[in-house]
Amino acid sequence: MRELIEKDRRITIVPHDFKFANKGVITDVNQDGFTVELDYEPDGFMKHNYCEFYTQTSHGTLYFDSYPKSIEGKKLVIANPAKHRFLQRRQYTRIKFVYDLELKDSSNNYNITTLDISAGGMKFKTSENINIEGEYNIVLPLSKEQNIECFFSPIRIEKNNEGTYTISGRFAYHNSKDKMTLTQYCAKRSIEIRNK
């Protein structure tokens, strides 16, 4: 595990209640575990309570479960995990996400049906003519209690035989916490789907 967890690498930590997800930097690695300096106060974290960990490596997205052995301010000492897995090689986990939603710009609303999402962007289909140069507002429903609002910029538009369009593009966020929340949501859903 020591060769996979590297000093100065960014890592995301999700406690049982994922609204307290946090990010930080690995500041030390030894044979018993590693130390993380968090970006935010460790609300929702408790000693010896398991959390999910996600970090990018040269092999892809590394995922594992472990727990804080100690919490001192924003500094967490994490126990070495018993096992780990790689989710996929792409930077963000992509999941199936089918909803009828509205895409908005300053003057119009467009009806779309999402096909998949990741923290990087989404793909959807629509019968409406959407400008590839535009920037649009979208609200993504992650649960009954939680929505994420962000901007969407189209990158690729394909016209389908039935006169509809399939559009792919990227997200831009109002704040980094929304991006982190969507990253964790997609990773968690990917694991749940795989384990069904």
Image (tube, rainbow, N blue to C red):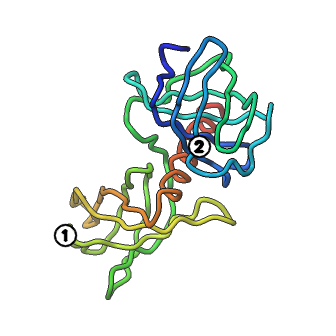
Q: Which residue is mark 1?
A: 133
How crowded pointer 1 is (Cα within 10 Å; few <14, some 14-19, many 20+) is rated as few
Q: Quadrant of the N terminus?
A: top right
Q: Position of residue 175 (x, y in %)?
A: 47, 63
Residue at (46% x, 30% y) in the render: 61
Could you tell me which quadrant the C terminus lies in? top right
Q: Type of residue at label 1?
A: Glu
Instruction: Please identify the residue farthest to the left as the structure is shown.
Output: 133
Could you tell me which residue is drawn at 72 percent across and 30 percent down?
67
Nearest the viewer among 24 and 129 is 24
Total number of numbered labels? Answer: 2
Q: Residue at x 61, y 40 (%)?
A: 13
Q: Which label is found at residue 38? A: 2
Query: Local crowd at mark 2 within 10 Å, few (<14), some, or many (≥20)?
Result: many
Instruction: State which tag comes first along the sequence, 2 or 1.
Output: 2
Residues 190 and 21: in front is 21
x then y, percent, for residue 56: 44, 31
Q: Amino acid at mark 2?
A: Leu
Residue at image coords 50%, 24%: 86
Horizontal and vertical percent for residue 123? 36, 55
Image location of residue 95, percent across then percent down? 49, 45
Left or right: 52, with 25 as reference point: right
Res 49 quadrant in image: top right
Task: Look at the picture and state if 108 lies above or below 174.
Answer: below
Image: 62 above or below 110: above
Residue at the front extreme of this rendering: 72
